[in-house]
Structure formats: C-alpha cells, structure tokens
Image (cartoon, rainbow, N blue to C red):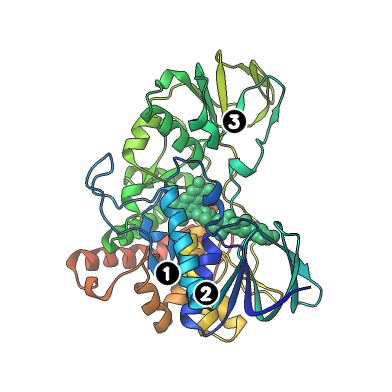
Amino acid sequence: MPKLDTDYLVVGAGATGMAFADALIDHADVHVTLLDRRHAAGGHWNDAYPFVQLHQASVFYGVASTVLGSGAIQQDGPEVGLQERARRAEIQAYYDDILYRRFLGSGRVTFLPASEYLGSDDGNTHRVVSHVSGEHVEVDVRRRLVDATYLAPTIPATTPPPFGVTDGARVVAVNDLPAVVETPGAYVIVGAGKTATDAIVWLLRNGVEADRIMWVRPRDPWMLNRACVQPDPVVALGLAADTFEAAASSASPDEMFLRLEAAGVMLRIDPDVLPTMAKTPTLGMWELDLLRTVENVVRNGHIKGVTAGEIEFEGAVVSLPSNALVVHCAASGLQYPPMVPIWGQDKVRVQTSRAGFPCFNAALVGFVEATRDDDLERNRLCPTNTLPNTTTDWSEMQSRGAAAAAAFGAEADIAAWANGCALNPARIEPGQRDRPEVLAAAARVAEHAPPGRARLTKFAGHWIS
Ligand SMILES: Cc1cc2nc3c(=O)[nH]c(=O)nc-3n(C[C@H](O)[C@H](O)[C@H](O)COP(=O)(O)OP(=O)(O)OC[C@H]3O[C@@H](n4cnc5c(N)ncnc54)[C@H](O)[C@@H]3O)c2cc1C
C-alpha cells in the first residue's frame, strides 16, 4: 500500500479547509496534505446552482493570502455603491488558482482529489481511498488531523428533497432550473433560505410573472440588509453598535429583531408576519422588492409529499397550479452539529469563533494553530461558536462572538494579523483608525456593548464568560 507522510492531514478542501491551510502554511514551516472526495477545491461551490452568487462582498470570502475579486464597488446594476459579489465560475477559478498555483506550487501542499477519508486505528496513520482508482493510501501524520467538514452545508444538488415524490410529480433540484426545456405553467419554489430567494429573483429577472410563482415558505426568514455588511469600518462598527443598542433596549429576541428592522439592519419579506428563522443571509433592497411581488405564499409548515397534482402537508393539502414545476430549494444549508472545542484530543474541528464569516474563522484557526503551542490556550483564544437558525441562536452567536473577538483581539499579534486580513469583517486598517466617522462609530460600540452583550447572553439562555 502506498504511504505518504505529512505534518497536517486536512480533510475537506472547501472554503474552511482552504482558508485553514492557507493561513497555516503562511505562518508555519509545515507540510499539509489536503484531501477531498470532490475532484477540485472549493467544496459545495462545485455543485452549486449555476446562477448562485456570494450573498456577501467577495473580499470577505476565500483565503487570507489572496483577495477574491478586485474589491471593486459596483458601478451599475441594482446594487450600485455596494461591493462586488463573485459568481460561481469566479469562485471556482479562484480556488483552482489557490490550490494549483499557490499550494501545490509551493511544494508544501499535497492534494488528494476524489479521495475519501476512512479513519485511523492509532491516531498516527490514517487511511484514505481514491474513488477513481480504488487505491488505498496510508498517510502518516506528524502533527494533526484537521476536520474541515464539520460545518459543511447541505445543498439541494447533493441532498434529496426532504419530502416524498410520487411518480408523475414534476420535481427538480434548483440546479436544474435553467435547464428546463418544456416551459412550466407555474413554478413552485420550496424553501425559505438564500437558495429559494435566489431562485425566485432569478425567475423574476428572466421574465416569469410573479403570479406564476407559488412560494412554499415553512418559516419566514429574517435577512440582513446587504448595505450593512460591507468592508468599511464605519459600516462594520455601525452594525455592531446597532446590534448592541437594539439588544440592550429589548425584552426579547423578537423585539430586538424588530428594532433592528426599524434601524434598517434586518429585513423581512412580509411586514405582517413575524419571522422565526434567523440564518440571516444578506439581501439587497432590490431583491426584497422583487420577492415581495410574489403573493401566492403557502405557509402550512413542511411538505410531506408531492404528487402529480397536489402538495401534502401535515393536516392540509394544496392543489398544484396546472403544469407546475416544483423546485427543491429545501436543503437545510447550515449545519448544527454539537459545539465541541476546536482543538480536540483527536483532531482539530474547524468551526466558527467570531459570529458568522466561516472563511475568516477558518483562517484564524490556521493562524492560531501556527502561532501558539498549547491547545488550552488555543481554545481560550478561539472558543467555539454556533451558527444561527432561530432568533435565540442568533443572539447566542452574537454573544459568543463578542466574547471570542475580545479574547483573540486582546493578543497583539492576532489583532495585527486580523486588521491586515481582508476576510475580517471587523477589520480596521491602521490608516483608518483616526477618521472622525470611525471614532464616532467606535464610541457608539463602546457605549452600547456592555449592556448589549449582557442582554444577548440573557436571550441566549445561558451564561457566557
Ligand atoms: C448557496 C450557498 C451560498 C453561500 N454563500 C455564502 C457567502 O456568500 N458567504 C459566506 O460567508 N458563506 C456562504 N455560505 C456558507 C457556507 O457555509 C460557506 O460558504 C462555506 O463554503 C462552507 O465551507 P465548508 O468548508 O464548511 O464546506 P464545503 O464547502 O461543503 O466543503 C467541505 C468539503 O469536505 C469534503 N468532504 C466531506 N467529507 C469528506 C470525507 N469523509 N472525505 C473527503 N472529503 C470530504 C466535501 O466533499 C467538501 O468539498 C453559503 C452556503 C451556500 C450553500
């Protein structure tokens, strides 16, 4: 059996595996072996629907060493004034370039494509199998096994619909939407997250009238106004101050979200329905306007089954419009495995520490792995965070994120690295610090953070030190 040896074996070459490996090799003289069951780097983007775009600015995505895109501000289209957002092809080309030019070109990274991680008996020698050749490889790992799959999202292309489909029902995954040849009389969009909103916006922009769309929305979502999540310290500090201020003045997470809506930070599609879902992708105001034109919204909870003519819910049946195409946008996306320390005895499990922003967090984990030599200290600097699903989870994510940012931000070297890292949404470059607008926004954060953090922690329902 062929044998390899390496310092780090990183399982998963998606966004988090790539960001971890990039920061690690930049700050430590080590060799990394990266493996993925997909044939290319970039994880789920390789199977994403063709019209997908980052929901956030490109500069917040990718790896720390190399900015994705040009950092340009959009000059035309519906998002004039906001930062550019990469499309699927650009994201794939970016990861391809990082993998082949930067990683493999350095001679310090080995990539095992189309390969499955099988496990280890002794914690030192790990078994990997190639899906293509069937060949088994043993990898001796001198330092760490790194699991960069722990938070990998599920997507419709690789996850069957979470409901029954009987013969004769016309159901496709969102990826197949642009390939439809026989034009449907109506489109039934199933899901309430970013994928569903993207599908509806895409249909409307391609000439489908709003009354030909039925939207099965089990929960209504809160979304972040994209204008409030931009790589500008005034905007970033403003968002933090608004969040702390709204939390401090509210008696419940719902009230906080309503205050954030009044402040222009949070968006909901239907002003008459209080959302219960808070995964909070960002949304443009132009997209909100389009989404609001769809009036045929079905709120009967989750679908149990689809037949040729009906959609069945628990306790309700809805007739399908004639010649309807049902579009599966209902994979859960974000995953919520148990929160465990990032540095465990058996492996590093790449997770978030500051709120959101998986790429920055994975790069931070790589930087801390490279620059600290004690796991207790590493876990103190990067305590694990959760990803949000409900408004309570969102409060917990903000609370834990503020505690984490205070911990790692108190270390001079990490603060300097983070302020030079474009992935960091809270980045303040040294030349920006004394701008009067930045100072004013920082003063608002300083005023509202203590009571805001205390209230967020209370909303989260547990004590966070
Ligand atoms: C449509 C969509 C849009 C998004 N947009 C944004 C955005 O704009 N900004 C943002 O910050 N986040 C966004 N996200 C959130 C998403 O969580 C992150 O983008 C990020 O890609 C997650 O990276 P990951 O490495 O955790 O997972 P993945 O990208 O899924 O990578 C994990 C990899 O591990 C591999 N793998 C798993 N198990 C094994 C095994 N046993 N052996 C070998 N390989 C294995 C998989 O093949 C996969 O390639 C979006 C998510 C989706 C679904």
Q: Quadrant of ligand 1?
A: bottom right
Q: Residue at x 32, y 39 (%)?
A: 285
* In this picture, residue 126 sits left or right of residue 330: right
Whole-angstrom CA distance, mark 3 to mark 1, is 37 Å
Sequence-wise, which precedes: disc 3 or disc 1? 1
Q: Residue at x 28, y 39 (%)?
A: 78
Tag of residue 172: 3
Q: Amino acid at mark 2?
A: Gly
* In this picture, residue 209 sits left or right of residue 441: right
* Label 3 secondary element: strand
Does 169 sit above or below residue 94? above
Give the residue furthest to the left: 436
Q: Amino acid at mark 1?
A: Ala
Q: Are marks 2 and 3 in contact (CB under 8 Å)?
A: no
Give how far across and how far down residue 77 sits, in percent: 26, 40
Does 438 sit above or below residue 164? below
Q: Are marks 1 and 2 in contact (CB under 8 Å)?
A: yes
Say which residue label 2 marks: 366
Q: Is residue 430 visible?
A: yes
Give how far across and how far down residue 207 sits, in percent: 37, 24
Q: Is residue 151 visible?
A: no
Give the residue furthest to the top: 322
Tag of residue 64: 1
Q: Residue at x 65, y 78 (%)?
A: 144
Q: Amino acid at mark 3?
A: Val
Give how far across and how far down residue 174 sits, in percent: 54, 35
Whole-angstrom CA distance, mark 1 to mark 2, is 10 Å
* Label 2 secondary element: helix
Does 319 sit above or below residue 18? above
